Image: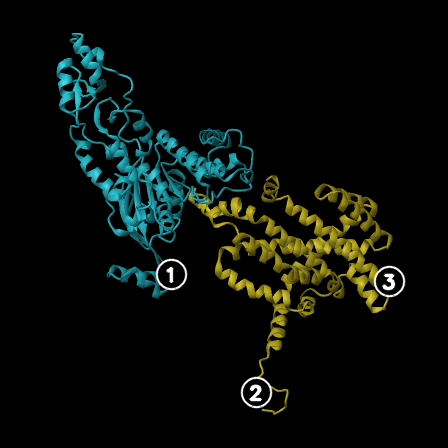
Chain colours: A yellow, B cyan
Amino acid sequence: MTHDVLASDLPRVPLGDWFDKAVTWLTDHCGWLFDGIGSAVESVVDGLVDVLTFPPALVLTVILAVVALVLRGWKLALFTLVGFGLIDSMELWEPAMDSLALVLVAAVVAVVIAIPIGVLAARNDTVSRVVRPLLDLMQTMPAFVYLIPAIFFFSIGVVPGVVATVIFALPPGVRLTELGIRGVDKEMVEAGEAFGAAPRKILGGVQVPLAMPSIMAGVNQLIMLSLSMVVIAGMVGAGGLGGVVLEGINRVDIATGFEGGTAVVVLAIFLDRVTSALGDRTPVAKAAARR
Amino acid sequence: MSLLRAEHVTKIFGRKAAEAQRKLNAGADPAKLRGLGVTPAVVDASFEVERGEIFVVMGLSGSGKSTLIRMLNGLLGTTSGRVLIDGQDIAKLSPKALRALRQEKISMVFQHFALFPHRTVLANAAYGLEVRGVPKEEREKKAREFLGLVGLDGWEDKVPGQLSGGMQQRVGLARALAAGTDIILMDEAFSALDPLIRREVQDLLLELQARLDKTIVFITHDLNEAMRIGDRIAVMREGRIVQIGTAEEILTEPTNDYVAQFVADVDRTRVLTAASVMEKPLVTVPANTGPRTALRTLREHQASAALVVGRDRRLVGKVSAAVIADAVGDGGRSLDELIDPEDVAPVRPDTPVADLFARAAESDLPLPVTDEHGVLLGVIPRVTLLAALGAINTHVEALIESAEPEKEGSPVDA
C-alpha cells in the first residue's frame, strides 16, 4: 500500500471500469437493438423536420400564432408572430426547426415513459422507492457523462441528442405524475371504491383526471428541460440551434451565440405558454374556473 | 335475518397486528398494546342492523367509528371477526364479487362529500349506476329523479364547486340513493355542515327514509344528531361499543359512567317523548253517564273539568263542572250535548316533550295523549312538564318510572 497523501486507505473500487465494461458488453451484444432504436428515432425526427420545414417559414409562423391565439390569447399570438419572425429574419429558421423537432420527439418519448412510471410509483411504494434514486441520478449526473456511452451506442448525430434529452427531461414528468396521483383526495378514491368501481376505472376516471393539473405541470417542466438540453445535444452532432450556439462559442463570435440563444428562448417561451394553457384546459381546471 | 351484521369485528393497525390480536384474545388491555406499535381501532364490535332501520354509531373522534364503517363495505379488511351482508361473509368474496356487492347492495355518503369536481352534478349523481354499466340515458333519468327528491332540480349541469356545502351533500345523498342499494353507509355525512344546514339535511334524510325505507348506518360524533335521527344508537369508546339502544334507553339507562356523562348535556326535551312523561288521568268521565253522575265524579276529585272518553276509551272531548251544573239545574238528562269536542287537541305519544309546552300553556286541562285511533293513553299535567323542563336527571327518571305502567297497561278508567 502506498502512503501517498491522496491515496485512500480503502481498496480501490473500480466503478468506472465496471461501467466501461458494461457499456462495451452492451454495444457488443445489443447492437442490433440500439441500431433499431437509433434508426427509428432518426427517421421520426427527420420526418418531423420535413413537416415543419415544408411550409414557408411565415406560413408556419402564422399557424403557430393561431394555435397560440386559440389556446392562450392574443398576447401570446403576437409574441409568436414577432418571435418566430425574428428567428426567420436571423436566418436561423432551419436550425430552429431541427431543434424543435428534436425537443418534441424527446418530450413525447419522455412523456410516454414518465407517466406510466409515475402512475406505477404512485400506486406501489416499492416501485416508488426504487424509482426515486434513479430519478435523482438522472437529474444530477452531469449530462456529458451519459452522453459518452450514448455516442457509443448510437454514434454521433441526432439520436444520442434525443436519448440524452429524454434521460435528462424524464424525472419531473415521473415525479409530478406520482405527486399528483398521490395527492388526489383519499375520500375521492374511496368514493370510487365504495360504489364498486374497478381499480382501472378509478385510475382513469378519478385519479388521473384529478391529478391532471399536476401531470400537465410535469409535462411542461419536462419540455422546458428538453429545451435546456439543446446546446448539449448540439455537442454530439445533433445540429440545430445547439450547433449554432456551439459555433458561436468555438469562434468566440458573440453575435452568433446570442442569436442562437435568443432563438432557443423564443421556442422555450412558446412551448411553455402553450403547454401550461393545455393544463388549464383539463376538466378539473375548467371545473375550478366555473366556480 | 338482519340485513347487516357485524360479529366480533376487530381492526388493529400496525405491523404486529396478529400478535396484538393474540394478546387481546388472551385478555390484554387494548390501551397497553400501543407499546407494540399497533393501534387497536375497533375491538370486538358486534351488532345487527335491521332492514329499514337507521342505526347510528356515535363516538368522539378516535373512537374507531370511521374504521368500523369502512369495514362494513370492505374498504378496510377486518383483523378478526366477520361482517355479513344478507348472510354473506364479505371477507370471503373475491375482489370482483366485492365490487358487485358494493354496486348492488351497499353505497356510501362521505364526510367531505367526495364529489368528483370535474363531473357535473348529474354525472356525479349517476356515478353508481355508471359503474354498474347502466346505459347513459337510463342512469341520467334515475339521477335526475333523485336529484329532484333531494331538492336540486335545475342544478344538474353545474359542477360541485358551484354548490354550497349543504347542496353538495344533497348530491352525495342523491348519488347514494340513485345507486339503488338497500344499505347506505353515512360517514359523518353532516358533520362538515353549519348547524342550521345540518338540521335541514337531517330532516331531508328522515323524510326520504320514511319514503324509501333504506337501511342506514350513520356515523356521527354529535349526540343530538344521533338522538334525532337514530332508531337505535351504538355508543363507541376507544374502539369498543359500550352500549346499543334507542335514544331513550341510552338517556335513561346508561350502562356506565362514560355514557351517562356523554348524555348529560343532551336537551332531554328533544329526546324524551310524551309517552315517557305521561301519567294516568286522575279523573275521566265516560260518555254514557248521565250529567248527575258526571258532576258527582268531578266533585269527588275536586276537578272543575274533565276529559270524556267513549266506550272504546276513545277521547270524545271535555266537560266542565260549571256547564254540567247549569244543565242539571235546567233538567237536562243527557251528557252528549254538554261535551265540548273542540279545545282538547290531543298529542301523540311520540311527540317530543319540547313541543308540548305551548300546548300545555293553552289548555286548563292536562294534555291528553292518544294513539292513532284516538284512544286515550294518558295525560300530561303541567306540573309534570315543568319538572321535565327542569331536566334534573333524577327527577325525570322518577317521572319516567311512574309513567312506565301506562305505556303497556290500560291507562284509563273512570
> Is residue A202 depicted above or below B408 in this figure?
below
Instruction: Quote the CA–CA distance across marks 2 and 1.
Output: 45 Å
Q: Nearer the viewer, residue A59 or B127?
A: B127
In this rendering, would B234 be left or right of A27?
left
Residue corresponding to mark 1: B14
Q: Position of residue B190 (x, y in %)?
A: 43, 41
How far is disc 3 from disc 1 in space, using C-alphas?
65 Å
Subunit that carries the residue with mark 3: A
Marks counted in the figure total 3
- Do residues under tags 3 and 2 come within 8 Å of each other at their CB atoms? no
Work out whether B149 lies above or below A9: above
Q: What's under tag 3, amino acid-wise?
A: Ala
Rendered residue at 63%/70% (across/down): A23
Q: Circle 3: is it few (<14), some (14-19), or many (20+) Cα within 10 Å?
A: few
What residue is at 31 percent from the left and 25 percent from the top?
A: B362
Q: Are marks 2 and 1 on the same chain?
A: no
Q: Mark 3 points at which residue?
A: A255
Q: Do labels 3 and 2 share a chain?
A: yes
Helix, strand or loop for disc 2: loop
Q: Which mark is residue A9?
A: 2
- Of the residues tagged 2 and 1, which is closer to the observer? 1
Amino acid at dot 1: Gly
Chain of the residue that carries numbered disc 1 in the rendered image: B
